[in-house]
Amino acid sequence: MHYSKFLKLLTAAVVSSFMIIGCGTQSDSKTGSFQVLLHDAPASYDEVNVFIERVEVNNGADEEGWVTVGEPQQVFDLLELTNGVLQPLGEIELETGTYEQVRLVLSQDGHSVVVDGVSHDMFIPSGAETGVKLNVNAEIRPDITYVLLLDFDASRSVVVTGTETSGQNYLLKPVIKATNQAITGNIEGTVSPVEAEPVVYAIASGDTLSSTYADTTSGNFRLIGLEAGTYTVSFAPTNENFQSKDTTGVEVTVDETNDIGSIVLDQN
């Protein structure tokens, strides 16, 4: 073969190889992390125990597109997840893009509520097979961790049927709010005296958007997962010997915690 012709063929082969390698590199999908954390608003029960099998995410309407984020396969007492306590449910690396839904799959049984020291089974009417679906539109970006907060509202999720005379049954109808942690901030402070044992609410436009119990030893409280804005922080003592109090104009800034200091509740 003529030398110049050989060089042309060799050059073409090398260029083709680089094109193939280059195309392959460009088509490789970037990934980011997706993490799901569980927390709760307070409820007037001793315990609210929920058996969570797994949490999944989907980036389309196709039922075949669900991907498992985590499989706890265990019972969680939701009332232990107040005052800023977060329970990881799972974390996964995902290809970049927008994921439209998450699904929390609960066991058909294994749920219970404790009332005045007595445990009662809770029955879930439906949802064990399809799960509790939530719209999230989570945008996964390269090398970034997207943290999704799931606020499992125990108070609204426990439904009581029947009467004390005929007998009461407890149903679990999950009420859950999903929030992107990256667009939220927090409010914290201390309330005294601790004997007041207040429930603390963050309220905006007449809606309660977060709530917690103040710690019964320190009086500390922390309201998490709040979008930027102005809130009224309301203190409602469970001890009837103390008066309620509102603190208005509390600002929340993304990725920051606003410490509103010490709040003193007056006695009746």
Image (cartoon, grey):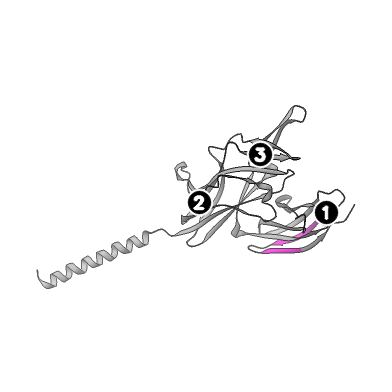
Amino acid type of the residue tagged 1 in the rendering = Glu
| Picture layout, residue 134 above or below residue 139 | above
- Regarding mark 2 in the picture, which secondary structure is present there? strand
Q: Which residues are magenta?
A: 239-260
Specify the farthest residue to the right: 268
Q: Earlier in the sequence, mark 3 or mark 1?
A: 3
Q: Which residue has dot 1 on it?
A: 195
Name the quadrant containing residue 157: top right
Q: Secondary structure at mark 3?
A: strand
Q: CA distance from mark 3 to mark 1?
A: 29 Å
How many numbered callouts? 3
Q: Which residue is mark 3?
A: 112
Q: 191 or 215: which is nearer to us?
A: 215
Q: Report, in whole angstroms, how far the alpha carbon at label 2 lies from the one at label 3.
A: 32 Å
In primary-sequence order, the first of circles 2 and 3 is 2
Residue 127 in the figure: left or right of residue 166: left
Q: Is residue 242 above or below residue 185?
A: above
Q: Is residue 241 magenta?
A: yes
